[in-house]
Amino acid sequence: MQDIENTTNSRLAEINREFSEGFEFLKKYPRSVTFFGAHQAKPGDPSYEDARALAERIVKELNYAVVTGGSSGIMEAANKGAYEAGGQSLGLHIDLPTEQIINGYTTAGANFHYFFVRKVCLAFAAEAYIFYPGGYGTLDEFFEIMTLVQTDKIAKAPIICIGSEYWNKLKGFIEAEILGKNNIDAKDMNIFTITDNHDEIIEIVKNAPVRTNIPFKA
């Protein structure tokens, strides 16, 4: 029993340390946009180049920091766009048993052992969330942030989905199988926006309120 208690206390202390250090790191960047999407995207792919270009505009036109998971694919593309524009390009890295690819386009970063701590930090205090097509991980992050906004656990912030062909199929499923069976309210369909127009996205982010208070609610 003592070994279990010691292990539990040690893990709780490590979790608390990661949360504290993660929040302290993000407090240095009061205006930010977080990018999510497939790690398989490669330079030259339409989604990769689109994310790179959008991140560049967010830095140049809005002077916001760009936050990603710091790895490959869409994360690399967004960091690259921000980095090459001379902006704040942040990576929240995760320690894995096998080596994770860490892209070379971040200006600052934080490391995490626990996935759930990292995921909370990726959702913490951003002025907007940008989602590109991805796999289970991207959809997990998408629906978690959607749920946090829906249940008023975090302050409402734009959730913008780029890649209309991909996201409109998911929207159709939500409308038919979730809204259609009264498992959400009609207003919940307005929590996210699907658009491929960078001008529209820049305006959405520019008009989003800066979240100066801690957004997570008890």
Image (cartoon, rainbow, N blue to C red):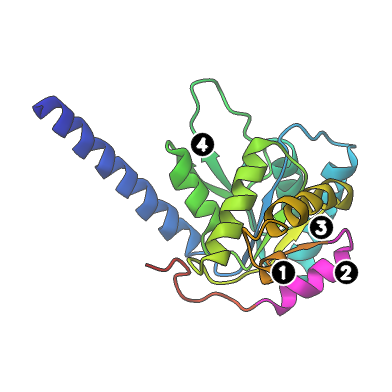
User: Pointer 3: what residue?
Assistant: 54
User: Pointer 2: what residue?
Assistant: 199
Q: Which of 131 and 206 is in front in this view?
A: 131
The residue at the far top in this view is: 98
Q: Nearer the viewer, residue 149 or 180?
A: 180
Kindly state the secondary structure of the residue where label 3 is placed.
Answer: helix
Magenta stretch encompasses residue 206? yes
Give amino acid for label 1: Asn
Q: How crowded is mark 2: few (under 14 residues within 10 Å), some or many (20 or more)?
A: few
Q: Distance between the residues labelled 3 and 2?
A: 9 Å
Whole-percent x, y for residue 6 in the image: 15, 32
User: Pointer 1: what residue?
Assistant: 190
Q: State which tag comes first along the sequence, 3 or 2.
A: 3
Kindly state the secondary structure of the residue where label 4 is placed.
Answer: strand
Are the two marked residues, 3 and 4, in contact with CB atoms closer than 8 angstroms?
Answer: no
Q: Is residue 198 visible?
A: yes
Q: Residues within 10 Å of mark 4 (few under 14, many from 20)?
A: many
Whole-percent x, y for residue 9 in the image: 19, 39
Q: Which residue is drawn at 49% across and 59% down?
A: 26
Q: Which residue is drawn at 87% across and 53% down?
A: 164
Q: In the rendered view of the protein, which quadrant contains the C terminus?
A: bottom left
Which-is-in-front pick, marks 3 and 1? 1
User: Pointer 4: what residue?
Assistant: 94
On screen, residue 212 versus residue 186, left or right, reads left
Kindly state the secondary structure of the residue where label 2 is placed.
Answer: helix
Give amino acid for label 4: Ile
Kindly state the secondary structure of the residue where label 1 is placed.
Answer: helix
| Residue 62 circle label | none
